[in-house]
Amino acid sequence: MKLTKTLMASTALTLAAGGAFAEAHVEMANDMTLVSWGGAYQASQQNAYVEPYLEMNPEVTATWDESSNEAVAKMRAMAEANNITWDLVDVVASDAIRLCDEGLAMEVDHDELLAPGDDGSDPTDDFGDLLVSDCFIPQIVYSTTAAYRNDVEEWGGEVPQDICALFDLETFPGQRTLERRPINNMEWALLCDGVAKEDIYDVLETEEGQDRAFAKLDTIKDQVIWWSAAAEPPQLLADGEAVIGSSYNGRWFSAIEEQDQPISMLWDAQVFDLDGWVIPAGLPEDRLARVKDFVRFATDTQRLADQAAYISYGPARMSSAPLVGDHAELGIAMGPHMPTAPENSQNVFVYNYEWWADYRDDLDAKFQAWLAQ
């Protein structure tokens, strides 16, 4: 991509133009390629902070690439080719850890890069335990959870009460839809095969435990439509092609509340996870300067609270939580739709992103081989 550039004024402090301090004579690229997940989540990013940033910086353009589900592989390939075409990449926490460990994502000083909280807190205090990697800039807490059609006649009035309904073909017949990767599927399989929550990762670490998870998944394999993009499951349920499945809680919220689909949430054993930005290592100085300016603005207290007005993900900053209000268009209170709401989080499964950072490549290969059988 051919970049146009602007030379910042020698004494300018661009607080109004994105929140970052642009030092004297720093050139900033005027194009950014942002990588995210598409669908409702990307739309929430566009509404909450990309559009406001572009309005304050009319010389800047931002292009989206919806490849976050392939971020690790693509960033490895870019680094090998010495051709980094992405400027800022939205990834889950475990992928951020992998990219950081491999030197593909840039380490940052969170207190230097990010804006203080509106309550005066340092970023490291405001984000707290969510700063799981020196390269990771958290945005949201979300969950992978299940949902189901609430008008399935074959169920005779029964509705799923827990996550193991996914594996109960007798009570809840019909096509399922699950993500085409081992994460969450392996944990739920073991949980529904009788493994205690606190023992899941110890069991999954063994060959026998992995075989046990695959054996449980075998019981529904021929009834599963496997998805890669999180926008697919809500559409599959809306079209009646599947009756129960997994996706991110914000995608289900969009289908249920915004599109009025006959779908209900199944919060049981929702898997908490983190999502945020990483900056690719090795960016040219002008592109890096622009990214730093943008990310400081996009992750400040108000912007993360604003994002919760468009999608039901909890903001990663503690200072943002009191500012979460109503949905920007529907006018409904967003608090009760957050995965962290007390009524939704009575039986949570906490995703072990550090474990998956260690085992992901191996289990990805095994999972794909199992799918091909």
Image (cartoon, rainbow, N blue to C red):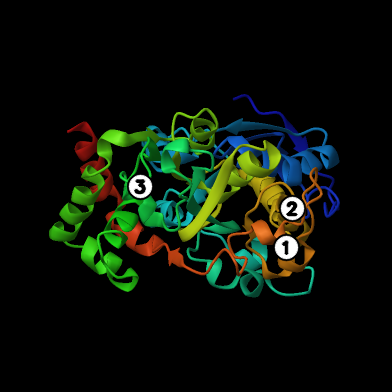
The answer, for residue 88, to whether it is visible in the render is no
How far is mark 2 from mark 3, CA to CA? 49 Å
Residue drawn 77% across and 50% down? Answer: 327
| Quadrant containing the N terminus in the rendered view | top right
Using residue 368 as the reference point, say whether residue 230 is left or right of it.
right
According to the picture, the residue beneath numbered tag 2 turns out to be 297
Q: Position of residue 177 (x, y in %)?
A: 40, 38
Going by the numbered disc 3, the residue's amino acid type is Thr
Specify whether 361 is left or right of 143.
left
Spatial CA distance of label 2 from label 1 is: 7 Å
**Residue 148 showing in the rendered view:** yes
As measured in the structure, the alpha-carbon distance from the residue carrying label 3 to the one carrying label 1 is 51 Å
Q: Which element carries disc 3, helix, strand or loop?
A: loop
Dot 3 or dot 1: first in sequence order is 1
Q: Residues within 10 Å of mark 3 (few under 14, many from 20)?
A: some
Task: Count residues near mark 1 (Cα–Cα under 10 Å), then give few for <14, some for 14-19, many for 20+.
Answer: many
Which disc is residue 115 wearing? Answer: 1
Q: Is residue 154 left or right of residue 265?
A: left
**The C terminus lies in quadrant:** top left
Q: Amino acid at mark 1?
A: Ala
Q: Which of the two discs, 2 and 3, sits closer to the camera?
A: 3
